[in-house]
Amino acid sequence: MLSADVAATPFDLKMEVDSNGQAADIATIDFQLMERVGAGDHEAFRELVERHQIAVVGTVAKMLGNPSEAEDIAQQVFLRIWRNAKRYRPEAKFTTYLYTITRNLVFNETRRRSRKKEVSADELEENSNHLIAASSDRQPDSELLQVELQRAVDAAIAGLPEAQRMAVVLRRYEQLSYEEIAEVLSLSVSAVKSLLFRARTTLRETLSGYLES
């Protein structure tokens, strides 16, 4: 659990309208909480963390491919929000602001890792093979195949260039719109669509063996 101690799925038209209304309500609540956080309200900050920490931790974990480090990076995301709350202006949805901070910290971490190769590709493959072998005695074939497929998908996403990876994670797992992703990545909507097209092409090629079976 992150500490708060710091100084579409498509539906029919009717459901889509309701969803838009709900999204507006969520954005309003986030803005109101940020106003209180900017005034130093710890309880409002705790509520803001509870509302968004699962999404942030999940995004970081998928970007870095290491769930054990995701919570530490997510903690840094929320610390930045706390420290900069007084300067926050609702020029975009709070979640856009949130994922922009997340993007910056994740990209910093991936660049740090690229300079410091702590684990070799051979070690990663050996660990993966060991996990699959260790679980094969305890899982039925269908479940084992599903686990292996999920690992393959995660590895394929992790192998994408960082901007493509972030676009895929925000689109597929967090259901952000093209416009929101464009704001997070400081790109045009057409550039985001191009990123996603290239990413999906790469993923299809990487996972072709699974898709054909």
Image (cartoon, rainbow, N blue to C red):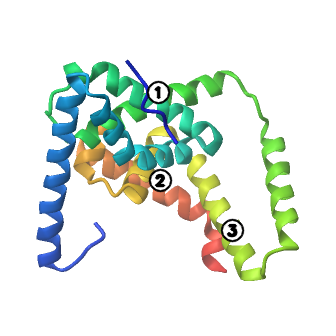
* Three-letter code for the amino acid on which mark 3 is drawn: Val
Give the residue pinned by disc 1.
76
Relative to 208, 43 lies left or right: left
Q: Give me the disc on residue 199.
A: 2
> What secondary structure is marked by label 3?
helix
Residue at horizontal 14%, vertical 46%?
Answer: 28
Q: State whether residue 142 appears in this view.
A: yes
Instruction: Tell me if mark 2 has few (under 14), some (14-19) or many (20+) residues whose alpha carbon lies within 10 angstroms of its own.
Output: many
Choose the circle earlier in sequence order: 2 or 3. Answer: 3
Query: Looking at the image, is 137 positioned above or below residue 59?
Result: below
Q: Report how far apart the C-alphas of labels 1 and 2 lie in the structure.
A: 28 Å
Q: State whether residue 186 appears in this view.
A: no
> What secondary structure is marked by label 2?
helix
**Pair 1/3: label in front:** 1
Q: Give me the disc on residue 2.
A: none
Give the residue pinned by disc 3.
147
Relative to 105, 84 lies left or right: left
> Which of the 4 quarters of the picture holds residue 122?
top right
